[in-house]
Image (cartoon, rainbow, N blue to C red):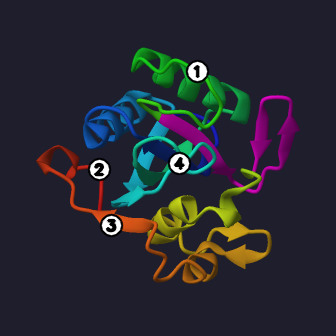
């Protein structure tokens, strides 16, 4: 990796097929990019669907990285990874093989048509905050740490730690 690296966080989710394998594949793809250094990946959490609730449960995780990619190229890389893995965007919040969302990109604030950083709804979503707090507890979201925000979701029955198979041991806690 060359150039000044920025610490960033991604949210990963899947609710089709072998969800854990899809998240592991996305992590492998991230780690293969020479402009990305994967620092850590949270455990997997099985969560109830959000938005469109008539679908199967999701597996969610968060990944922390250092990257020399600027926000827009990082988004393009995430979207290319989704397409490579077979994601088809048919309906908002619908079922998906993989979903990669940029949550945080250093201290950057980006407000563009298809990219908003920090992710505008992450503090409201336990399926994002709980795994993010696991790998980056001091990350600031709206003036509060991820760890403090995660405490708001303690005991939430819609967020369940998932026991991953051996294919995820290199990527999850």
Pointer 3 residue = 161
* Circle 1: element type: loop
Whether residues under marks 4 and 1 lie with C-beta atoms below 8 angstroms apart, the answer is: no
Q: Residues within 10 Å of mark 2 (few under 14, many from 20)?
A: many
Pointer 2 residue = 171
Q: CA distance from mark 3 to mark 2?
A: 15 Å
* Circle 4: element type: strand
- Left or right of residue 54: residue 30: left
Tag count: 4
Instruction: Say if 122 sits above or below 6 in the image.
Output: below
Whether residues under marks 2 and 1 lie with C-beta atoms below 8 angstroms apart, the answer is: no
Q: Residue at x 67, y 58 (%)?
A: 122
Whichever of labels 4 and 3 marks the residue nearer the N terminus, that label is 4
Q: CA distance from mark 4 to mark 3?
A: 16 Å
The x, y position of residue 94, in whole percent, is: 55, 33
Can you tell which of label 3 and label 2 is closer to the viewer?
A: 3
Whether residues under marks 4 and 2 lie with C-beta atoms below 8 angstroms apart, the answer is: no
- Left or right of residue 99: residue 41: left
Can you tell which of label 2 and label 1 is closer to the viewer?
A: 1
Can you tell which of label 4 and label 2 is closer to the viewer?
A: 4
Q: CA distance from mark 2 to mark 1?
A: 26 Å
Pointer 4 residue = 11
Q: Does 104 appear in magenta?
A: yes
Figure quadrant of residue 138: bottom right
Whichever of labels 3 and 2 marks the residue nearer the N terminus, that label is 3
Q: CA distance from mark 3 to mark 1?
A: 27 Å
Can you tell which of label 4 and label 3 is closer to the viewer?
A: 3
Task: Write the start and end of the magenta stretch as one range.
Answer: 99-117
Figure quadrant of residue 34: top left
Q: Quadrant of the C terminus?
A: bottom left
């Amino acid at each position: 990796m060359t150039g000044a690296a920025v610490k960033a966080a991604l949210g990963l989710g899947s609710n089709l097929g072998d969800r854990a394998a899809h998240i592991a594949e996305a992590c492998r793809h991230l780690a293969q990019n020479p402009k990305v250094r994967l620092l850590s990946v949270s455990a997997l959490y099985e969560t109830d669907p959000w938005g469109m609730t008539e679908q199967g449960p999701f597996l969610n995780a968060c990944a922390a990285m250092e990257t020399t990619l600027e926000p827009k190229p990082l988004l393009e890389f995430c979207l290319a990874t989704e397409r490579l893995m077979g994601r088809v965007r048919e309906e908002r919040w619908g079922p998906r093989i993989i979903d990669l969302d940029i949550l945080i990109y250093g201290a950057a604030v980006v407000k563009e048509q298809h990219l908003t950083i920090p992710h505008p709804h992450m503090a409201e979503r336990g399926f994002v905050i709980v795994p993010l707090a696991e790998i980056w507890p001091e990350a600031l979201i709206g003036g509060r740490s991820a760890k403090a925000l995660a405490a708001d979701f303690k005991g939430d029955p819609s967020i369940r730690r998932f026991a991953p198979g051996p294919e995820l041991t290199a990527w999850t806690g």
